[in-house]
Image: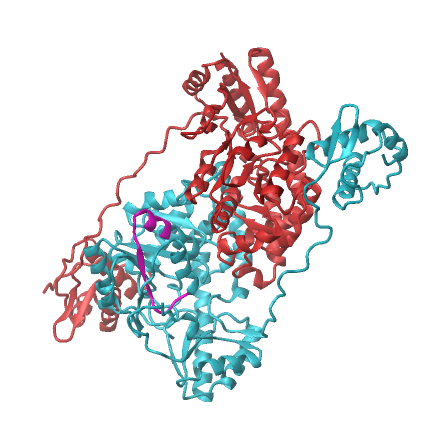
Chain colours: A cyan, B red
Amino acid sequence: MITDLHLDVRGPGLRAGLTHALREAVRMGRLAPGTLLPPSRSLAADLGVSRNTVADSYAELVAEGWLTARQGSGTRVARRAEPNPADPPAARTKPAQRPAFGLQPGSPDLAGFPRRAWLTAARHALTAAPHDAFGYGDALGQVQLRTALADYLARARGVYAEPERIVVCSGFHHGLALTAQALRTRQVRAVAVEAYGLDHHRGLLTGAGLRTPPLHVDEHGARIDDLARLRGVGAVLLTPAHQHPTGGTLHPDRRTAAVDWACSTGGLIMEDDYDGEFRYDRPPVGALQGLAPERVVYFGSVSKSLAPGVRLGWMVLPEELVPEIVAAKGHGDYMTSALGQLTLAEFITSGAYDRHVRSMRLRYRRRRDELVTALARRAPAVRVTGLAAGLQAVLELPRGTESSVVRAAAREGLAVTGIAAFRYEPAGSDRESPRRDALVVNYAAPPDSAWACALDTLCRVMP
Amino acid sequence: MITDLHLDVRGPGLRAGLTHALREAVRMGRLAPGTLLPPSRSLAADLGVSRNTVADSYAELVAEGWLTARQGSGTRVARRAEPNPADPPAARTKPAQRPAFGLQPGSPDLAGFPRRAWLTAARHALTAAPHDAFGYGDALGQVQLRTALADYLARARGVYAEPERIVVCSGFHHGLALTAQALRTRQVRAVAVEAYGLDHHRGLLTGAGLRTPPLHVDEHGARIDDLARLRGVGAVLLTPAHQHPTGGTLHPDRRTAAVDWACSTGGLIMEDDYDGEFRYDRPPVGALQGLAPERVVYFGSVSKSLAPGVRLGWMVLPEELVPEIVAAKGHGDYMTSALGQLTLAEFITSGAYDRHVRSMRLRYRRRRDELVTALARRAPAVRVTGLAAGLQAVLELPRGTESSVVRAAAREGLAVTGIAAFRYEPAGSDRESPRRDALVVNYAAPPDSAWACALDTLCRVMP
């Protein structure tokens, strides 16, 4: 039995402090397993606290499993099956050295996030919400947001959208995962994807047990006529308004062909409308979904129009698919904040969303024009494509120079992404994609303070 | 060819209005597939607009697939493979008739959500955040929140928590789904669960391909000694602080036994600490996780302490499991709002969270005491258990009366849940759980305005 127990009793309240100190002494091994603790009466006298304080502390630690108390044998430190780590482990991964500038695709200008307008919307939304809105939500999402989206999507994107067929999600990743799960439940085995796209999205599909045969991509988007040649394909994932990342718009004939394929085979078109709001030289091309609402799953989000960190997106579904997506969600809204949904609803209905998109469209168009002008002057051999819309442009490079340009940029502190990072050529696919060397340049992302310097560096490393 | 085309041109901008009107005419079938449209020159004259306006509209609708244009054959309405629904379909499901009062488990008092304090935290957090915080986040979650949680969980719940082993999620549902996925990747085949619990949680596990053999539950929580008898179990899901819904606290010997089982078999304990903050008559029982941080996955959330609609929770993981959960999350934070995370971090570090929990604890204790007093006076034969903690109590009923009491309550407009709704007896389990008749009464949920009446009705329908 130990009698002299040095404990640093601190923290809010004597008992809580004593309990904490004892727990730490056991955790750190200063009190070894099996050690008999002093009777509560004597420890209380030592510490100058009441006996009850000590007895309560002991009881609490017994209840937690740190100590054991047996009739007639006093209170002991419990035998523990495992020592606890005394020191936090060393950091597992060092943060990668960050380049000074980045023009990689994926993010809008985060400095443009409308903090003040968002907070105003949050205040209005949270003040007006009924108490029920803070509970477990409906699997479809908050009705205020679905109503606001139905109006917005019909108006701005030509989507046939009723609130009853809109399902709110946390962004495209979440929506794609839910759809993949529903497709698997339908016994779909394969989803055709564009031969240029994000690894990450294909990984979600293959992770759900779906094969992902590729469709070749040219300047008019995905080659839809290849669909008929692929076996067992139950759906196709497309970026019709602005192919990601090559930048083409799906040709009208191919839009029709995709709808025909879906109608004649019972297949689904998954339309990723990731940057539909941003088109500069003419009105946006409306969503493919409007042509065949019962055959298209339409995906949108605020990740490009506001910021990825808002984590809000939406799916507009064929009516018959709604129950299957609700089942995939677990018959409730377990992912997406009600507070965020209500705030976005207010943000849209108040007109703040339209204003923000308009203002960012001007900003991004200016950036795009500066990019084109600078390249024309300083690297006239480089052809720039995919310029009509979105946040990025494709800079076509001479054959065989892509990786050396990426490396040269990195040496100058500029992170850029070659188009090879998006090429998808699974083993065993029948034909190779035509090779091309290019950079995918996100001119929208850098803050204003970094843009001029990033652009200068980019021009300097062009071949 | 039609020459007289009545179009209601409205909306912002002539061209946009014309495009919208034409699109709707095609969608609604007023312009049949194949119909030849008037030349742009003549329609422009009819409408009194410039020829370019009409030509641009036609071009846009061709790009969208509504119209087709062929050299020498004019512009026609595209052949469409599918008619679009002209009217919104009838509502699929009628909202269920809602009872006047509800005492079903699951929700805290939603009227208690601290709207004003939350908005204050949001303002501070959003104003202070660096631009980067609005981008795609780290898979672990925002570091500000993980740091705040590490401090809070160590202090309030005795959790061994470093920010590097905390993963933010959207609540227990999300955390459980991620863990189930990681367990499947580890080739785990079965997770033992408590014989009383939520169907919904078991469904998540079975949906991931895991068997869920049950452990019997008595007044000291789950019978951990049954674990050794179950074959192929790689993890066990427990509610140690307050068994859900029967209300017992896991006995100290069983806490130790669970840790011993985990250490000797390499199994994992999944600790659902769903209402750990709310304990009324003594300090909360600390988390089991503190005893064996490398063998316990600890889950917590704000769903009971703030509101389910916030959709924020956390997991504290064994260090070796962190990369597996990060992989299950898709190596990024695709689910949980950065804005919400930063707001919660500020809410915790400012002390608002502690204040809110304290104030709700007082409110819920008062409710609990009123429930006990009223039942003792008006239904003295009913034994009330599970009272020490949480938001609900178990009212033990005479044998065979549970379903008739639930029905009687419903007739009076009071929704209550019998304990049978939580009993889990899979086909082929070796022994039946001891039968009991009881109600699980969530005294925390009703707003103050409804509580007196709900309590009165509850007492009136007691046998």
Q: Is residue A382 left or right of residue A228?
A: right
Q: Is residue B116 left or right of residue B65?
A: right
Which residue corresponds to the image point at 20% horizontal and 53% vertical from the top-left? B28
Near-viewer residue (A382 or A197): A197
Near-viewer residue (A70 or A420): A70
How many numbered discs, if any? 0
Residue A421 appears at what percent x and percent y?
44, 72
Q: Is residue A433 visible?
A: yes
Q: Reply yes or no: does residue A191 show up in magenta.
A: yes
- Magenta span of residues: A180-198
Q: Is residue A268 above or below residue B358?
A: below
Residue B423 appears at what percent x and percent y?
47, 27
Residue A347 appears at what percent x and percent y?
47, 53
Q: Is residue B281 left or right of residue A140?
A: right
Which residue corresponds to the image point at 54% horizontal and 56% vertical from the top-left? B139
Q: Reply yes or no: does residue B189 show up in magenta.
A: no
Which residue corresponds to the image point at 48% horizontal and 66% vertical from the top-left? A108
Residue A414 appears at what percent x and percent y?
55, 77
Near-viewer residue (A189 or A361): A189
Q: Is residue B301 visible?
A: no
The picture quadrant where one finds residue B8 is bottom left
Which residue corresponds to the image point at 42% horizontal and 21% vertical from the top-left? B410
Near-viewer residue (B157 or A242): B157
Image quadrant containing the N terminus of chain A? top right
